């Protein structure tokens, strides 16, 4: 016990000795050695548990000048000790009071750098705790700064957001409720930290309509842009049952409020800030800046048009087609991503814009714009490549919605484009079914030149053909082939040769040459090949001791996983069933053509 007491006395005595020595010096006479001795002695007091004695020293009016110049050196050991003690420990409370005193007494510039350094050095699970601990003293210091205030506020916000960015964003309801690393709480604390600076900009803007001090405003906009990219772009922002105050929805509200208050919300939604981005000599930096800005603006559009944040500020003067046009770039940015949280925002934004529009109201001229061609192609990629079934289904529904909004020439142009670019039999089959529906409308409800006559003949050249003639893989292309046969069957039944509204009878010879004949040849070859395979498998099975022999099989050029002979036979029989189905529809089409041609010849004779 006496030994412990003597250590206590030593730690406090050492500090007192340095303080007494420095009390008699002028501020300008403090040496580097004095700073080091003060830091070591203060750190020893903290580490040995004598924060109360250190607090007394700091609060002593006589030591004001010393603390002003040297106190910032205690930030690092102070933060370590705060995290070391439990919440209810008196020593922790003393440390927190020391932190508050340092914020009041220290040289603002020195303390600012000390606090930033502490935030920069933190990592992992302690990031959010450290940031939340130091936000209040950092805000106090920034409000005191006279020079380079805007730069310092911007540096602080950028540093904080850069430290938070590597942390995973809670996505599920359970993750948001748990907030394991404290990110939800921390993001909202950072917004509170920024509020005095937002208020300062707003007051200055109110004083003068020609507000020239743009630096602080620009730093706040940068913070909002960074927040839109992270965490909001990755966050789950739907209303969640059981969560009364959704932390990310609250954060999104605060960010859109800041942008509105500084007069940038509407300009950012409609204007791409080309002139505002910094000039980078390094092209790689310029590309990163452009991508970050594109992600942020896309997220902002999602917040406004899907989640309706800031919608009360929105002018109700824009047509639905103009809003779609403004958002097409943002939709394209979001649909290029693969993360569910981002991709779903792109689909929701696209759907929201389309649902505002009347069917058949979107003019075909829009397809001359790059985004209006790229976005449906992105949808096709999601429909065919995305591993999440609900995303694939939603993409298909949105593609149909997009088709429905165009005028007839727009539909025609879009069908041509997708037939040429999709490279997927299922998608091509879906487009061909849409073509059939449009022809039906043209023949039964209203005339249009795009799905009858010479325009349709040009489209039929694309729809009624085999990609590689008789060599086409019929199994892989079965969806497209069946859709094409159904379209041809419909045309032959619905359009008499004497009327020939669709022009199908004019181009029948070409259809037979390019589609029906090679399809018949391909069917015969494919059926013969698969029947031979089945025969071989059955003979091999008889020779083998067991039907459970495992081997591999290739279907449509792709090697299937290892299967028993019985499983392989099942696959081969399934392929034969598909060929039989194609053959039955083909036979019916050929029969209809023959009957209709004969009837027309009889009429003419």
Image (spheres, rainbow, N blue to C red):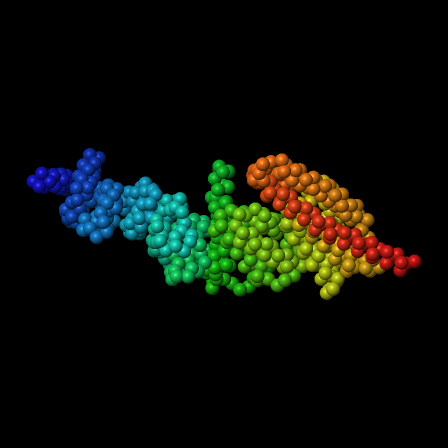
Q: Is residue 343 visible?
A: yes
How far from the left and from the top, in percent, is residue 435? 70, 55
Q: Name the residue nearer the viewer: 157 or 458.
A: 458
Q: Name the residue nearer the viewer: 507 or 109.
A: 507
Residue at 39 percent across and 60 percent down: it is: 243
Q: Name the residue nearer the viewer: 413 or 472.
A: 472
Residue found farthest to the top? 33
How far from the left and from the top, in percent, is residue 488? 75, 54
Q: Which image quadrant: the C terminus? A: bottom right
Q: Quadrant of residue 448?
A: bottom right
Q: Which image quadrant: the N terminus? A: top left
Q: Is residue 459 visible?
A: no
How far from the left and from the top, in percent, is residue 424? 64, 46
How far from the left and from the top, in percent, is residue 422? 64, 47
Q: Is residue 566 above or below residue 93?
A: above
Residue at 72 percent across and 60 percent down: it is: 440
Residue at 31 percent across and 45 percent down: it is: 126
Residue found farthest to the left? 2
Horizontal side, residue 177 vs residue 320: left or right: left
Horizontal side, residue 116 vs residue 476: left or right: left
Tell me how many marks there are: 0
Q: Is residue 13 above or below residue 96?
A: above
Horizontal side, residue 452 vs residue 174: left or right: right
Residue at 51 percent across and 47 percent down: it is: 338
Horizontal side, residue 579 vs residue 35: left or right: right
């Amino acid at each position: 016990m006496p030994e412990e007491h003597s250590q206590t006395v030593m730690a406090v005595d050492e500090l007192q000795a340095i303080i007494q020595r420095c009390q008699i010096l002028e501020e300008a006479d403090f040496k580097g050695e004095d700073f080091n001795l003060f830091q070591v002695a203060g750190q020893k007091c903290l580490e040995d548990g004598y924060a109360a004695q250190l607090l007394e020293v700091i609060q002593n009016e006589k030591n004001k000048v010393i603390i002003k110049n040297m106190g910032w050196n205690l930030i690092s050991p102070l933060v370590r000790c705060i995290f070391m003690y439990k919440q209810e420990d008196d020593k922790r409370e003393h440390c927190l009071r020391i932190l508050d005193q340092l914020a009041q007494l220290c040289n603002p510039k020195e303390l600012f750098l000390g606090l930033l350094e502490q935030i920069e050095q933190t990592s992992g699970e302690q990031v959010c705790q450290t940031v939340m601990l130091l936000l209040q003293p950092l805000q106090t210091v920034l409000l005191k700064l006279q020079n380079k205030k805007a730069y310092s506020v911007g540096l602080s916000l950028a540093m904080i957001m850069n430290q938070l960015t590597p942390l995973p964003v809670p996505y599920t309801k359970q993750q948001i409720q748990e907030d394991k690393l404290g990110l939800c709480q921390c993001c909202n604390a950072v917004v509170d930290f920024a509020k005095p600076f937002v208020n300062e900009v707003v007051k200055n803007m109110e004083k003068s309509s020609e507000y020239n001090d743009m630096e602080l405003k620009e730093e706040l906009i940068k913070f909002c842009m960074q927040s839109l990219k992270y965490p909001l772009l990755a966050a789950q922002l739907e209303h969640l049952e059981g969560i009364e105050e959704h932390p990310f929805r609250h954060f999104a509200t605060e960010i859109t409020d800041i942008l509105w208050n500084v007069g940038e919300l509407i300009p950012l939604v409609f204007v791409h800030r080309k002139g505002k981005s910094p000039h980078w000599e390094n092209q790689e930096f310029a590309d990163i800046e452009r991508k970050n800005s594109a992600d942020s603006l896309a997220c902002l559009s999602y917040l406004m048009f899907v989640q309706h944040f800031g919608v009360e500020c929105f002018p109700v003067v824009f047509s639905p087609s103009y809003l779609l046009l403004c958002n097409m770039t943002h939709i394209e940015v979001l649909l290029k991503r693969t993360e569910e949280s981002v991709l779903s925002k792109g689909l929701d934004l696209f759907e929201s814009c389309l649902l505002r529009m009347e069917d058949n109201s979107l003019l075909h001229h829009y397809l001359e714009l790059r985004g209006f061609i790229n976005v449906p192609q992105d949808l096709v990629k999601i429909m065919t490549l995305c591993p999440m079934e609900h995303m694939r289904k939603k993409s298909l529904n949105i593609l149909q919605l997009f088709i429905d909004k165009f005028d007839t020439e727009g539909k025609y142009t879009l069908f041509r484009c997708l037939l040429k670019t999709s490279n997927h039999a299922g998608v091509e089959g879906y487009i061909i079914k849409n073509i059939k529906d449009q022809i039906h409308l043209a023949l039964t409800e209203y005339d249009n030149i795009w799905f009858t006559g010479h325009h349709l003949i040009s489209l039929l050249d694309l729809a009624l053909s085999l990609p590689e003639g008789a060599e086409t893989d019929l199994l892989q292309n079965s969806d497209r082939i069946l859709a094409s046969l159904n379209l041809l069957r419909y045309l032959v039944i619905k359009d008499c040769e004497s009327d020939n509204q669709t022009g199908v009878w004019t181009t029948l010879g070409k259809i037979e040459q390019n589609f029906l004949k090679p399809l018949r040849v391909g069917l015969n070859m494919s059926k013969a090949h698969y029947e031979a395979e089945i025969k071989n498998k059955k003979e091999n099975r008889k020779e083998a001791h067991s039907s459970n022999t495992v081997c591999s099989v290739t279907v449509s050029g792709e090697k299937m996983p290892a299967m028993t002979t019985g499983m392989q036979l099942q696959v081969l029989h399934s392929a034969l069933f598909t060929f039989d189905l194609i053959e039955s529809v083909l036979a019916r089409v050929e029969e209809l053509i023959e009957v209709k041609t004969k009837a027309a010849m009889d009429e003419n004779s």
